[in-house]
Structure formats: C-alpha cells, structure tokens
Image (cartoon, rainbow, N blue to C red):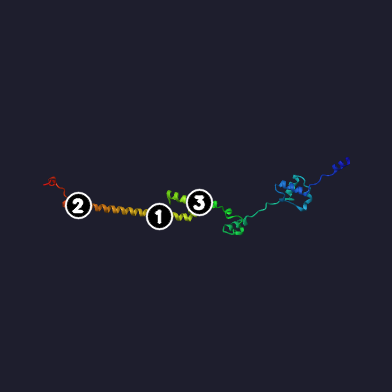
Amino acid sequence: MHEILRHRCDTPPLTATVPFTKRLAASVAGCGKRKVWLDPNEVNEISNANSRQTVRKLLSDGLIIKKPVTMHSRASARELTAARRIGRHRGYGKRKGTADARMPTAVMWMRRLRVLRRLLVKYRAAGKIDKHLYHELYHLSKGNTFKHKRALVEHIHRAKAEKQREIKLKEEMDAKRAKTKAARERRQERIQTKRNQMPGDEELTPAQQQPQ
C-alpha cells in the first residue's frame, strides 16, 4: 500500500492538453473557442501552456491568435428589400399567411383615416375650409365615405363650388327682390301722384257737405 502511494506521489503532473489550452485562451482573450486559432506547428509548446500567464505570452508571441469578427454584409438584404418595394418577390408562392394576417384591415383603416384627418386639419389651418365644413367632412370620413385622399379633395372642391353657386344665386335673388320692390314702390308713387293730381279728388268744405 505504501509503495502504491509513493508511486503516485513520484509521478510528474499531467501536462495540459490542447482543448484545455484553447478554452483557457478563449477565456483570456475574451471570446469564444471558435475564435481562437492555435498554431499547428507549435502544438507541443501550446499543450504545455497550463496557466493564464503562459497563454498571455503565447498570445503576445502570435502562437495563439484571436480571429477577427466575421462581417455579415447587408448588401444583399438591401437589394432584396428594394426589389420588394417595387413589387418583386411578392407573388402567390411567397405568401405564407392570409391577406388580413399580412396586412390587417384595422391597420389599413387607421392609416387611411389618419391621412384624411391630417388633410382636413391642414386645410382648416390654411383657411381653405371653415369649421362647419370641417366638422361635416370629419364625420363623412369616419363613415367611410372617402376611399382615398383624392376623393376627399374632389369632394371639397365640389362643396366649395356648390357653396359659391348658392351664394351667387342668393345674391341674384336678393338683387331681383330689391329691384322688384323698388319698381313696386315707384309704381305706387306714380299712382299716388296721379290720384293727387285728379280735380275730383279735392276735399269738400263743410258748407258743401250740408244737404240742400
């Protein structure tokens, strides 16, 4: 028994293996084991490195190298995105979900309504529409009357033209009524003047009014 223990104590310590050195080098370099390069011509010296200090010396000597970070170019991804924006790669074979899943109708509705409301606010601030027309068009937009901005702009132009036409008709009717009223007043004045000029219309004296 004593001989066995003496034999174990007399045996030299085991040298570090290459995987252990690689793991130690990754820890010292602050990277993963995949990023550590070991010089294949210096395997014996590398395998004897069993401490961090020795590994640091090997790193400084160039026997162990930390590989550079691999660059992943975005050029192909940008080209694909630009192609998809003009309609490429969007056929039936590329679609994996339903139409509502790919573009929800609620999102489309919110985007369209926000465009219409921004236009109404812009026109009201610029004085192109008054607050009454703004209120009316706001509720018409909420009621899904306008499918796009062009329809709303055309409706605004038609509404303004109709309002101008109504104002013009009202002015014409007011002018016509004023003209008719003036003509009627002139006619009444002429009639009254003629009545005043007639001799039989003179007032009788009290003596003439007494019966004979």
- In the picture, measured across the screen, residue 64 lies left or right of residue 200, that is right
Between 78 and 141, the one lying in front of the other is 141
- Nearer mark to the viewer, of 1 and 2: 2
Label 3 Cα neighbours within 10 Å, binned few <14 / some 14-19 / many ≥20? many
User: CB atoms at circles 1 and 2 under 8 Å apart?
Assistant: no
Residue type beneath disc 2 = Arg
Residue 69 as seen in the image, left or right of residue 9: left
- Residue type at tag 1: Glu
Q: Nearer the viewer, residue 79 or 130?
A: 130
| Cα gap from disc 2 to disc 3, whole angstroms | 72 Å
Which disc number belongs to residue 162? Answer: 1
Q: Amino acid at mark 3?
A: Leu
Tag of residue 195: 2
Q: Earlier in the sequence, mark 1 or mark 2?
A: 1
Q: Which label sits on residue 117?
A: none
Disc 3: which residue: 113
Q: Position of residue 171 (x, y in %)?
A: 34, 53
C-alpha distance separating marks 1 and 3 = 25 Å
Q: Residue at x 74, y 47 (%)?
A: 23
Residue located at (38% from left, 54% from top): 166
